[in-house]
Image (cartoon, rainbow, N blue to C red):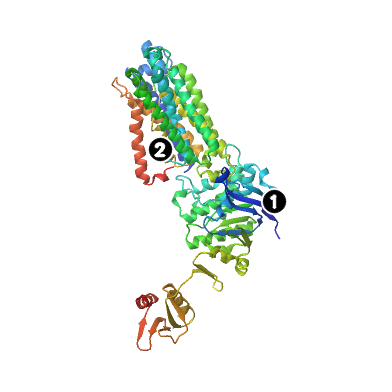
Amino acid sequence: MNSKKTILIFILLIFLLVLLFLADLLTGPVHIPLKEFFHMLSGKDAVSDINRTILVAFRLPKAITALMAGAALSVSGLQMQTIFRNPLAGPYVLGISSGAGLGVALVVLGFGSVFSGHEISYLGNWVQIMAAWTGSALVLFIILLVSVKVKDIMTILILGILFGSAASAIISILQYFSQQTMLKAFVIWSMGNLGSLSVRQLYVLIPCILAGLLMSMIQVKQLNLFLLGETYAKSMGMNIRISRILVFISTSILAGSITAFCGPIGFIGIAVPHVVRLILNTANHRILIPGTILTGAIVLLGSDIISTIPGRDVILPVNSVTALMGIPVVIWLIVKNRRLSSLN
Amino acid sequence: MHKEILTTKSLSIGYEGGGKNQKRLFSGLNLACRKGEIIGLIGRNGSGKSTLLKTLAGIIEPLDGNIFINDLSIKGFKRRELARQVSFVSTEVPVIPNLSVSELVSLGRYPHTDWTGRLSPEDIKQVNISIDQVDVGYLSGKPIAEISDGERQRAMIARALAQDTRIMILDEPTAFLDLPNKYEILRLLNHLAAKKGKAILFSTHDLGIAFHEADKIWLFLDENIITGAPEDLILNKKFFKLFDNSSLTFDLVKGEIRPERSFTGKLGVSGEGILKLWTVRALERIGIEAVDKDQELNLSIDDIDGELLWRLNDYKTELIFHSIYELCLHLKTIIN
């Protein structure tokens, strides 16, 4: 691919990103006139206090969260597809979302009988976030422990899936014995939500995501070599274990943080990297990672706009929207390429 | 005479694994490879060729003993230092969509670039030289998923060349290739050894090719590895050990390997040179031994102005065939 075309695509992606970011700010149950919106952007005061609050305290954090989550999940999906050389790998193959889910389930369902629902919501969602984080960190820790001992990457993949299943099984047990209100709180968490973050929480989320993305970009050289498989990577002097662990840590920070704050958001991480490979026509992570960051953010902002159903005051769970958008992409890729194994 | 560049001292190879899981394939190996030399590794399936090659390339740890490059133990090498001395082409030829030939070859510069992996002008020059050396310049912008198996194998060799190492190790580089491609790859390796002074080790199941193109053979037998020029191994009969417990024999005169035959009938054959040679081969295949004429049944082969005729004669009647295929069809009905 010539570099001129690549640059053009990047300009287009950035343009789309800005456009969708603004569109996301504009959509929501409350209608904010376009004129007022631009007045605010240009710093004029001719905006009602309510609309200002809606924009600054609700829609702006939500749009930034969508941007961060889209970028983070897509990059971690790309990393997992590369390192496992498997086109169906995603940010959650290591069991990170199940770990987070288990953490949340333990707090919401397990201790739900100790606290009342009201008390939990009073503690703010920080408890929930910390629980999710701890859960995914625990899974990461187990995976890292395994990857120090186990050489075969496929064994790690299978163990990741098994840990995830084990966590899901425990969640099921907790669900079975929990009260209705707690169950609902957990189910809502598991549907994903981009709009629950406060500005203060963003101050925590943003550095985490930037750190994860930076780690990923530092690993460009190693990720490219992982494409050829570990035997070749080793024969060219790469330290497989360290590189693998760094990629796992980066993936866990990215996917773990997003899952902790927003709940599990599916299919973005699997579908976006494929779309990016297709439009940029390259396997080089130096181009793929920035492309994936932009496209992931665009897709999740788009999903968020769809989920608010412009003109109505109903909001769909964002997880359903990403699934309904992502699954056709994956199906299309499978049908188009016939052989799934050639997708990565 | 060139200096030995790669040597092993009391090397033991096999698979690691705690206690009983350890599988030791060979012990006490003292092997050597010189600069500019091309060595073919030959042995039955599972004889340990891949394991030895991977051990020499630093991918598998030796169980015991030591490997030296220019008299320096590779234990003292850092990963990247070793990767600048030894390159490896495995049996696995990855098919990665959207990866172009030149991008693939560039990956070979890994041990030479800094942490960002950016290619310097020197790196780019080396990549282009490598692509030219294997004659895939016309493919450099093409995705590796869209080129032929032979071309892809060349690209993989170019990647190893870009690594700019003095030792190249290739595990079955000619597997899955058609005959012209097999010879092309070997001629390329031969050229790299002779002209660029590289030490090249490759494993193969194509005995004919290995015997034609390798300077030296490492013959993997059950107990040990025997080395020597291909012709030495034939003359000292070590080579025949490869066919122990198999139904194959090696024809010392023709230099070809073929299945051992048991015959169910005899046929007197008379004819000239090549015509007779190929007819006899067909007869042997269907289990008929070709002997001198004056048998109960005789065959004479004639070339009458370019028309080939096989006359089958039992003193009473004569049958004429226009092809070996027809002849064999008829003979099969007689012997069964």
The image shows residue A131, relative to residue B319, as above or below, that is above
Q: Which mark is residue B70?
A: 1
Task: Give x and y (percent) for residue B214.
Answer: 60, 62
Q: Do labels 1 and 2 share a chain?
A: no
Q: How crowded is mark 1: few (under 14 residues within 10 Å), some or many (20 or more)?
A: few
Dot 2, crowdedness within 10 Å: few (<14), some or many (≥20)? some
Q: Is residue B146 left or right of residue B167?
A: left
Measured Cα–Cα span from mark 1 to mark 2? 49 Å
User: Mark 1 near mark 2, Cβ–Cβ under 8 Å?
Assistant: no
User: From the viewer's perspective, is the residue at label 1 or at label 2 nearer?
Assistant: 1
Say if B319 sits above or below B261 in the image: below
Residue B219: percent from left, percent from top: 59, 60
Write down the chain letter for disc 2: A
Q: Which chain is indicated by disc 1?
A: B
Which mark, residue A275? 2
Examine the image and state in which quarter residue B40 appears.
bottom right
Name of the residue lying farthest toward the left? A312
Q: What residue type is labelled 1?
A: Asn
Q: Does residue A192 appear anywhere in the picture?
A: no
Q: What element carries label 1?
A: loop
Figure quadrant of residue A111: top left
Q: Nearer the viewer, residue A55 or A46?
A: A55
Q: Which of A238 and A180 is in front in this view?
A: A180
